[in-house]
Amino acid sequence: MADRLRASKEAKQVQLQRAQAAAASPDATERREARQAVVAARNIRLATRKAEEQARREREAARRAAAEAEALRAEQESRAAEQAARAAKELELGRREAAEQAQREAILAARRAGRKAKKRRGR
């Protein structure tokens, strides 16, 4: 049993030494640096994409806000035009009614004058 434990311990030591030697080798250092460069480049691409997406969203929001403002302005102008048209129509209706009333009054006045004249002649 002791031999097995000692053999296992020695195998672990050998593996550890190989791993340390491989990690200390110039090739491993280059590979690590290359991996770090790839990770850094990927992070830069992701950050750039994220910034572009944020800028696109902001432009879209500004465009929507401008379109909404334009629609609101057009709606207000339309309402103002409708109110002006309604006011002009009411004014015209009032003028027409006043003219008709004046005409009725003139007819009534003429009738009254005719009756008075008839009464005077009939005396």
Image (cartoon, rainbow, N blue to C red):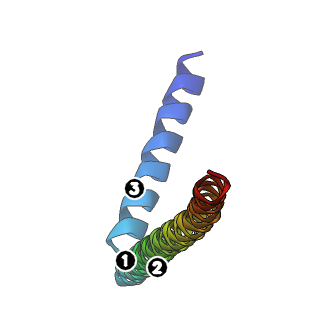
Circle number at residue 63: 2
Horizontal side, residue 79 vs residue 65: left or right? right
Q: Which residue is mark 3?
A: 17
Q: Amino acid at mark 3?
A: Gln
Which residue is rendered at x = 44% and y = 81% of the image?
45
Q: Amino acid at mark 2?
A: Arg
Residue 77 percent coordinates (x, y): 46, 75
Res. 28 image quadrant: bottom left
Q: Can residue 30 be seen by looking at this rendering?
A: yes
Residue tagged by mark 1?
40
What amino acid type should be assigned to the residue bearing mark 1? Ala
Q: Earlier in the sequence, mark 3 or mark 2?
A: 3
- Foreground tag (1 vs 3): 1
Q: Earlier in the sequence, mark 2 or mark 1?
A: 1
Q: Residues within 10 Å of mark 1 (few under 14, many from 20)?
A: few
Q: Dot 3, crowdedness within 10 Å: few (<14), some or many (≥20)? A: few
Closer to the chain start, of discs 1 and 3, is 3
Q: CA distance from mark 1 to mark 3?
A: 30 Å
Residue 82 horizontal/vertical position (percent): 55, 70
